Amino acid sequence: MRQVFSNLDFETKGQGFTNITKDINLWIRDNKLKKGILLIFLKHTSCSLIINENADINVLKDLSNYMQAIVPEEQFYPIDRSSKKIKYLHSEEGLDDMPAHIRTMLTANNLSFSVIDGKLEIGIWQAIYIWEHRTSNKSRSLQLHAIGDFELD
């Protein structure tokens, strides 16, 4: 048993989902991980790492619409709607930045998976996504940490 650490970089295209499942599977194959655990950590605070539906694009659209409804841009109402809208204080990096931080807090920045027989163990209708919460294109970096049995060279 051994460990491998690595980074993978991605470019997102503004708010939305980037399917990284094939990239993760390619990493597993290239590193010859046969069985073990793969930990994936997204090194950012304004995008998320999720696993979700990969068959019906409407699932991702609904997720995005729901998140926009519960974490609106620029300002929000208190939960009890007892007072006026409250503007976000943090806006130095743009009006989309603070809502992006909240959306990340409500989701995740890391996932862990089993790898069996050199394959990522996920459901047939599942995919791994970077969920970009910022409106502009961004460079995003993942740290991968595999612990397990690797094929000998």
Image (cartoon, rainbow, N blue to C red):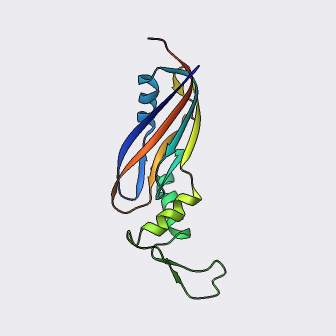
Q: Nearer the viewer, residue 53 or 34?
A: 34
The residue at the point 53 percent across, 50 percent down is 109
Q: Position of residue 49 (x, y in %)?
A: 51, 48
Vertical relation: 111 (above or below) 44: above
In the rendered view, does 7 fall on the left or right side of 70? left
Give residue 80's quadrant in the image.
bottom right
Give residue 51's quadrant in the image.
top right
Q: Nearer the viewer, residue 2 or 106?
A: 2
Give residue 93's quadrant in the image.
bottom left
Q: Position of residue 50 (x, y in %)?
A: 53, 48
Q: Looking at the rendering, in which quadrant would you find the C terminus? A: top left
The residue at the point 43 percent across, 29 percent down is 27
List the single residue furthest toward the top.
153
Residue 54 can be seen in this image: no
Q: Position of residue 62 (x, y in %)?
A: 51, 59
Q: Nearer the viewer, residue 120 or 124?
A: 120
- How many discs appear? 0
Q: Looking at the rendering, in which quadrant would you find the N terminus? A: top right
The residue at the point 58 percent across, 59 percent down is 106
The residue at the point 56 percent across, 88 percent down is 84
Residue 144 can be seen in this image: yes
List the single residue furthest toward the right.
80
Q: Position of residue 94 (x, y in %)?
A: 38, 70
In the rendered view, does 111 fall on the left or right side of 91? right
